[in-house]
Amino acid sequence: MKNKHQFSLAQRINVNIYGSVTKDCLNFIKLIYQNFDKTLESPEATLNIEITDVLPEIENKFQLGKDGYSDDKTLVLSSGHSITREESGFTIKVPSKVKRGRIPFKRLTPGRHITDEIIEPFLQLLLLDTNATFVHASSVYENEEVDVLMGWRGTGKTNAILKDFGSKEIWSDDLAIIDTDGFVYPYLRPIRLYSYNLPLIDKGYLKNHNLNFKKHITPPWRPVHYLPLKNKNNIKRAKLKKIYYLNNPNSSSLGKDAEEIMHFEQLFFENYRIMLKHLGVFKNKRTVSDIINKALAIK
C-alpha cells in the first residue's frame, strides 16, 4: 500500500504512515514531522501505522474480556485498533473514526491521535528496545553538546527555550531523546505555542501569522500555533552536556525522576502496555532509568 508519509528518528527507527488517511489528518501529520530525517536503509526497528477499518484475521487464542482478544503476536482492541508485533517493530492499525476525550461519540480520526496517542508511545517502546529513551524535556544544542531541560508539565520548559529561540539551536520542545552512550538526538516536533507563550515571541512573527487575533478565538487548552524547529547544521546527534531537572535542581536520582515523569506523561497508554506485557507480545529489556543512568555515567 502506498505510504502517505515516512520519516526516521534517532538514527535507528523508521516510521511509515499509510491507509485511508483524511486530508486534514495527513496535513497535521506532515506539519508535525516535516523536519524529521528521511527513512533509513537499515533501521534497527520499524513502526508501521495503517488507518483502516479492516481488522486483522487472527485466531482468538486469548480473550481479554470485553477489551480485546489476541493470538501470539497480535492484539485486537474493542476500539477498532490492533497491535501486531513484527520481527523488528510494530504494525498498528487505527480505525477511521475514534472516540477521544470527553466527547461521547466517535469522530474522524484526527492527526493528533496518530501523533500523540499512537506514534509517540510506540516509539518509546522501540527506543527502549534500542537502548534509548524519550525524556519529557526541552533540549538546546550549543558548542557540540546538548543541555536537556527536564520537568513536569507546566514547569516552563517551552518558555525556557523560547528565550533562546534564534540565538541557539533548539532540538526539542517537549520530548528529548537520549541513549545509553550519552548522546542526544533531535526531536524536531514543532513547538506548540499556547496563549501564555506568545509574549516571548517576536512581535513581527506574531503579526505575520496573525497570532494576536488567533489567541482570542483559540480555546486555552489548544495550541494557537505550531512554531517549526529545524536542524540547521544537520547534526544527527551530540553529546549530552547536562540534564537540568527544573522542578528539583539538586536531585540525585535523575534516572528515577525521568522515568516517573515519562510514566505520568504516557499514563493514558498504560492499559495497552499492561496488555502487551501480559500477553508476552512485547517486553522491554531496559527502563528509562537504566538508560539515563548509563548516559550520565559516561560524563
Image (cartoon, rainbow, N blue to C red):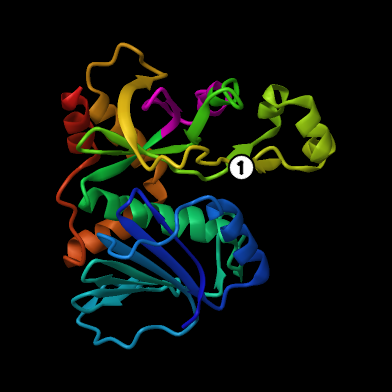
**Residue 136 image position (x, y, % from top left):** 40, 35
Q: Quadrant of residue 96?
A: bottom right
**Residue 19 image position (x, y, % from top left):** 51, 78
Q: Quadrant of residue 48?
A: bottom left
Magenta range is: 137-160
Is 153 within the magenta?
Answer: yes
Q: Nearer the viewer, residue 32 or 69?
A: 32
Mark 1 highlights which residue?
A: 228
Eyeballing the image, is 58 above or below 27? Answer: below
> Residue at the location (20% across, 59% down)?
277
Q: Dot 1, how many residues are within 10 Å of its Cα: few (below 14), some (14-19), or many (20+)? A: some
Eyeballing the image, is 111 above or below 247? Answer: below
**Residue 111 image position (x, y, % from top left):** 58, 60
> Residue at the location (45% across, 71% down)?
79
Is 21 within the magenta?
Answer: no
Q: Amino acid at mark 1?
A: Pro
Q: Is residue 202 left or right of residue 297?
A: right
Disc 1 secondary structure class: loop
Eyeballing the image, is 197 above or below 192? Answer: above
